[in-house]
Image: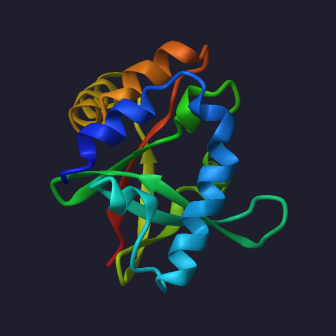
Amino acid sequence: MGLMTPLAIRIGAIPWLPRFLPQIVWFDKLLQRVSRGGVTVLDLAGLPNLNLTVTGRKSGIERTTPLLCVPDGDTILIAGSYFGGPTMPLWVGNLRAAHGDAWVTSGRERFRVRATELTCDDRAAAWRTMLATWPNYAKYEERTDRVIPVFRLARVA
């Protein structure tokens, strides 16, 4: 966690923030392009993050999405929260269709992962771990009627 993390948590809790998600993602991609992948909005906030690359289930084109992540031992946890919006993020459907096969870029490192969607007790335990890093996941859960999917990413050797 960084110096800006408490501020990022307060900003992330603003109820109307999801309306600006497209602009935030656009700015984040611009920042990454200008910094040649060296800096993201989440880096500025002092939060762990990655870029998840999954092949589109309809287009067959690789799609990359910047995501907040939570390291958990040798694995990484991610959530399809979309700020608690009513619709499922597109990357979730693509990841499910790809049977969990994806690529992760973290900093300057790129590696293959296998994602497992967590359910029941495994999801509940992972969710508690994720809340410790990003308490706003609880707010996102309150904002939506859907179950926010949680995935565990494990490196593929």
The answer to whether residue 103 of the structure is visible from this angle is: yes
Decide if residue 15 is on the left or right side of residue 113. right
Q: Position of residue 143 (x, y in %)?
A: 55, 16
Decide if residue 121 is on the left or right side of residue 150. left
Looking at this view, is 15 or 117 the one in front? 15
Residue at x 47%, y 82% (from the top left corner) = 35
Decide if residue 115 is on the left or right side of residue 31. left
Q: Position of residue 63 (x, y in %)?
A: 67, 67
Decide if residue 120 is on the left or right side of residue 149. left
Number of residue marks: 0
Q: Position of residue 11 (x, y in %)?
A: 42, 34
Residue at x 61%, y 56% (from the top left corner) = 25
The quadrant holding residue 88 is top right
144 is higher (above) or lower (below) than 17 = above
Q: State the quadrant of the C terminus.
A: bottom left
The answer to whether residue 93 of the structure is visible from this angle is: no
The quadrant holding residue 41 is bottom left
Residue at x 37%, y 28% (from the top left corner) = 136
| Residue at the far right in the pictured view | 59
